[in-house]
Image: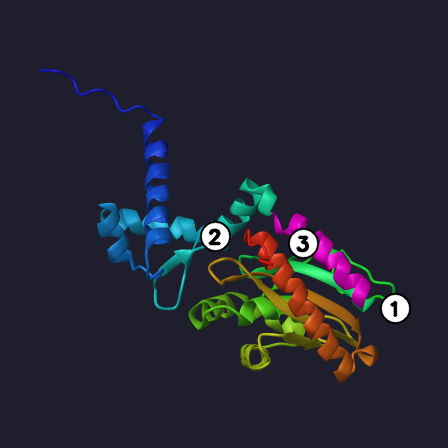
Amino acid sequence: MRKKPKENKHSIPAQTVGRAVDLLRIIASSQSHNLKLIEIAAMADLDKSTAQRLLTRLVHEKLLIRDTNRGYRLGPLLYEFGLAAFPENNIQEVSQGALRKLAKSTGDMVFLVIRSGMDSVCLNRIAGDYPIQTLTRTEGDRHPLGVGAGGLAILAGMHDADIKTIIQSINLRLPKYQLNEKKLWENIFDTRLNNHIAIDRGTAALDVTAIGHPIYNKAHTPVAAVFVASVSIRMNKNRQEKIIQQLSATAQSIENLLNGYSPHF
């Protein structure tokens, strides 16, 4: 009788990685983007317990998210990996010129934030020439999504199911920002009614008003936001309307560069 060959000690971890990648491919290729555990297990030809174990770990690592309908979607870490893999599409690099132009035209402090899991992270800030500049954020600062004009602009542009999942995760952190779940939903609805322009009056910083605009990827998912902040006394209604127009043009310019679009003349 021939002896069964010994299993290579490295084969099990490699097999696990392969299965995890297969699950990511299945979810990424799904038209519904909301596959349930039993569907994923069947499509991957895995038993339910194995699929659940892999999916749980992928959610923990932010490669997947699980919504309130118990379905699975691609997670934010995959987007961050994508930016690192394709530096020519790195939003921090491609947005530099547009942000400098906005800071010069408004005279105020301009910020760029991206989504990272349940938070927004500041990637860049550029000062204008107005004598009073508002340093509400610095590079690397992290706050829950929905906090500040940039984080609120991103959150309001997402699907309600994803928003519910995020709020459940950040709920205990909201009181630090004088927010709760009810107030955050009110801010989201107000932002949507305002053509997805987020206005923060003193939540992120006392006596500072900030106006934020989301930045979308090709799938029309909000992945970042640009916002302008200034002392509240300077942000009268007429000035806010002017800044909103400038923000919209800036966000569109960044989206075009990020997503590979070029204007036609």
Give residue 95's mark. 3
Q: Quadrant for residue 210, please give it.
A: bottom right
The boundaries of the magenta stretch are: 90-105
**Residue 55 appears in the figure:** yes
Which residue position is annotated with label 2?
62
In the image as oriented, which residue stretches furthest toward the top?
Answer: 1
Q: Of the residues tagged 3 and 1, which is closer to the observer?
A: 3
User: Mark 2 belongs to which amino acid?
Assistant: Lys
Distance from disc 2 to disc 3, alpha carbons, whole Å, reads 25 Å
Which residue position is annotated with label 1?
132
Q: Secondary structure at mark 1?
A: loop
Q: Of the residues tagged 2 and 3, which is closer to the observer?
A: 3
| Residue 79 magenta-highlighted | no
User: Mark 3 belongs to which amino acid?
Assistant: Ser
Q: Secondary structure at mark 3?
A: loop
**Above or below 172: residue 64:** above
Q: Quadrant for residue 10, please give it.
A: top left
Q: Main secondary structure of the magenta part?
A: helix
Which of the pair 94/50 is nearer the observer? 94
In the image as oriented, which residue stretches furthest toward the front?
Answer: 265
**Image point 68% across, 59% down: which residue?**
112
Which quadrant: the N terminus? top left
**Image point 27% across, 24% down: which residue?**
7
Where's residue 96, x and y in %?
Answer: 71, 52
